[in-house]
Amino acid sequence: MLLIAFEGIDGSGKGTQAKLLARWIREKGYDVFLTKEPTDGAIGKLLRESLRTSCFDARTEALLFAADRSEHLREIMKKLHEGKVVITERYLYSSLAYQSVSGLEMSWLREINAFAPEADLVVYLDVEPEVALERISSRNSLRASVREKEHFERREFLEKVREVYLALAKDSENFEVVDASGTINEVQASVRRRVGRRLAAFEEEKKHSEQRALEDFT
């Protein structure tokens, strides 16, 4: 049915907003499948271990992210074919943003992820790195290793990642940029307005398609 991806730098609130949106869409009568990347599968677990211990270099990690996404898509496509709304916390765009800033070529990253279809809607939660880092430091984060704090949570790195995300958003009609600096409820209200418009457009197109099919049949 629809694939919605939540994107943003660490601390932007992706997990919280994705869960709240899933609840809202279910209340509107849709079946929802909520998921995330890295996954909880074998490759995803290997990736999480790598992020904790730095056992792989950036290029190997990029390939593992792509492999995990390939496995993930088998499940995503199945749910879409069942007519579900799929909401994923992180997707293809995380690889393009984070791993390009880590020094890998954007063209190569796109090539190894060429199998991954674009999301129908990308909700990019935009927040200043200073705000994101304050949120991360104020909670009990599982990302406690020195390596992750140095490479994935430092201000300069996140500023560059944010710049890539904003460039991706500028070049794609599928991106909705949401100011994520407000309260949880404020951000969710903004997310719902944008997603609500997409759902309405989808239903309108579905109605027209059914009407055309009926006319062709008759």
Image (cartoon, rainbow, N blue to C red):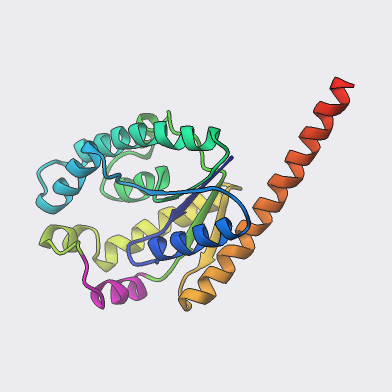
Q: Nearer the viewer, residue 39 or 93?
A: 39
Question: Residue 50: image x %, image y %?
Answer: 15, 46
**76 part of magenta stretch:** no
Judged left or right of residue 212, residue 163 is left
The residue under the point 48% across, 57% down is 166
The residue under the point 17% across, 41% down is 46
Q: How many marks?
A: 0
Question: Residue 110: image x %, image y %?
Answer: 40, 35
Q: Quadrant of residue 107?
A: top left
* Placement of the N terminus among the 4 image quadrants: top right
The residue under the point 20% across, 36% down is 60
Q: Which residues are magenta?
A: 129-141
Judged left or right of residue 119, residue 152 is left
Judged left or right of residue 20, residue 174 is right
Question: Residue 128: image x %, image y %?
Answer: 40, 71
Relative height, residue 185 to residue 144 (above, below): below
Question: Residue 194: image x %, image y %?
Answer: 62, 60
Judged left or right of residue 207, residue 177 is left
Q: Seen from this angle, which residue lies furthest top?
A: 217
Q: Quadrant of residue 14?
A: bottom left
Predominant secondary structure in magenta? helix
**140 part of magenta stretch:** yes
The residue under the point 26% across, 49% down is 102
Relative height, residue 87 to residue 110 (above, below): below
Relative height, residue 20 to residue 39 (above, below): below
* Placement of the C terminus among the 4 image quadrants: top right
